[in-house]
Amino acid sequence: MKSLDEFFAPATTRLLIFCLFASAVFWFQGWQPSLIQDHIFYFWNADAILAYFGPAHPAHGLHQYWRGFSDNLTLSVGLAYLHSFTNDHVVSCKIILWATTVLYLCAFFLFTALFAQRASYRTLLSVLSCFFVSYGPTFWGYTDFQASLSRSLALPLHLVFLYFYFRWYRSWLRISVFPAAAYSSFIHLSGFH
């Protein structure tokens, strides 16, 4: 029988575990999760993008939703693209949550290489990092479905930046982390508000 480290060693096994975890979140959330004002704003903007770049206005560029990208419409542009596959903004949000959950878990697994060697421990730490209690209005997180920054694209990027910074701490290249982190923070803040 294989040891835990041999089982978790292949990257495909870890990716499968991370995808299964994200799928469990997708399923447990149900088809009618709680929505807050931000979600309605994203849906309304996605509908506006769909209408502006839809068949009614071919001169604007048919289905070229990326043209609607601005400093505060990042998520709405993503919802517009997914709408042609899902025909439902809630399911589109859940798909984005699924993808960002997997990205977060992979980034945290990379980050744990700084202080843990065994793949089984790193995988366990990655999954456990998704379980936390947060406060604030009901929002879509991982477990209790409340406010969670882990679901955004910013945190996986910042974990990779931290890994790069501490892994090559003695190199002058670590300085590049600061502008990259600042830029990704701007993208995060403008994309979700």
Image (cartoon, rainbow, N blue to C red):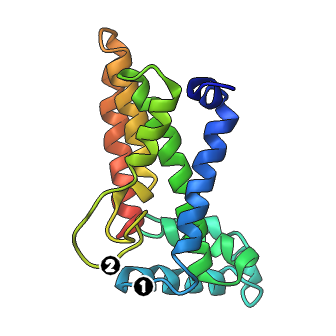
The residue drawn where x is 40% and y is 47% is: 128
Q: Find residue 34 and name its label.
A: 1
Q: Residue furthest left?
A: 135
Q: Position of residue 171 (x, y in %)?
A: 34, 10
Q: Position of residue 2 (x, y in %)?
A: 67, 25
- Asked if the residues shown at circle 2 and circle 1 are in contact, with their CB atoms under 8 angstroms apart, the answer is yes
- For the residue pair 171 and 57, the one nearer the viewer reads as 171
Q: Is residue 162 above or below residue 129?
A: above
Q: Which residue is mark 2?
A: 138
**Residue sitting nearer the eye, 117 or 57:** 117
Secondary structure under the numbered disc 2 in the rendered image: loop
Q: Residue at 63% across / 75% down in the picture?
A: 80
Give the residue drawn at x 55%, y 80%.
30
Give the amino acid at mark 2. Answer: Thr
Specify the quadrant that holds the C terminus.
bottom left
Residue 73: image location, x then y, percent: 47, 70
Q: Residue at x 51, y 31 (%)?
A: 120
Taking 140 as reference, is 164 above or below it? Answer: above
